Image (spheres, rainbow, N blue to C red):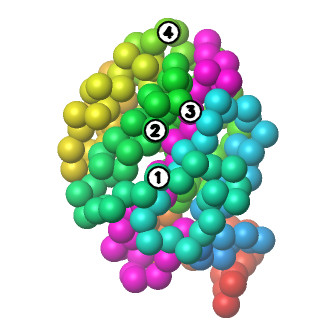
Amino acid sequence: MLKPEQVALILLAAGRSHRFTDADKLAEPFLDKPLAYHVVTALENVPFMTRIAVVSGTSLDFAARGYRVAMNPDPALGQARSLSQGILAAREAGAEAVLVALADMPRVTATHIHRLLDAADGPATIVASSDGVRPLPPALFGRDQFDALLALRGDEGGRELIKRGHHVVTTPAELVDIDTREDLEELRALYGLPTDGK
């Protein structure tokens, strides 16, 4: 088990969104706020040691929401580049572990994050979310995994690492990842808001 006070939250918010068109996907409205602020709001009362948002080209002000902002100058190099920016900042802060979350997963809950923390078992821990079929973010990595995370390249992120970890199952609905405009429209339709923000 890890306490959140030992953990740095890394919010990956620097994707190129090339499957979403040229819009700032994270700033797209969903319900009452920009898409990316849903996970920010859901986790705002979890007492993390520090919060780090890795960004590139978004208009959203994560600093105003309590995040240390790290720039990814070249998101074309893939998610691993963003992850490494977050890991370096977390290591500098003295974190015992990192919780890696994606800004385009608007239905993640604090309850699930606490379940991930409860499943941790020391500095070598790897705990990932699962929809019952495959491991997914959010994922928790102990400090002994930092070097392996820094060595990653391309768009794989921590995908191979989390296959080897402990998996905490939650509903597929909680782990919805908005990659395309169609994904967002489907989610809006679930809430009876097919033209949300229009």
- Mark 4 residue crowding within 10 angstroms, few (<14) / some (14–19) / many (20+): some
Compare marks 2 and 1 and give the one earlier in the sequence.
1
The residue positioned 62% from the left and 49% from the top of the image is 67
Q: Position of residue 110 (x, y in %)?
A: 71, 38
In this view, which residue lies farthest toward the top?
122
- Evaluate if marks 3 and 2 touch, with contact meaning CB atoms under 8 Å apart: yes
Measure the C-alpha gap from mark 3 to mark 2. 9 Å
Give the magenta part as a residue range: 1-26
Give the camera-side residue of 189 and 106: 106
Residue 122: assigned label: 4
Measure the C-alpha gap from mark 3 to mark 1. 13 Å
Measure the C-alpha gap from mark 2 to mark 4. 20 Å
Compare marks 3 and 1 and give the one earlier in the sequence.
3
Q: Position of residue 6 (x, y in %)?
A: 61, 21
- Evaluate if marks 2 and 1 touch, with contact meaning CB atoms under 8 Å apart: yes
Give the camera-side residue of 140 and 195: 140
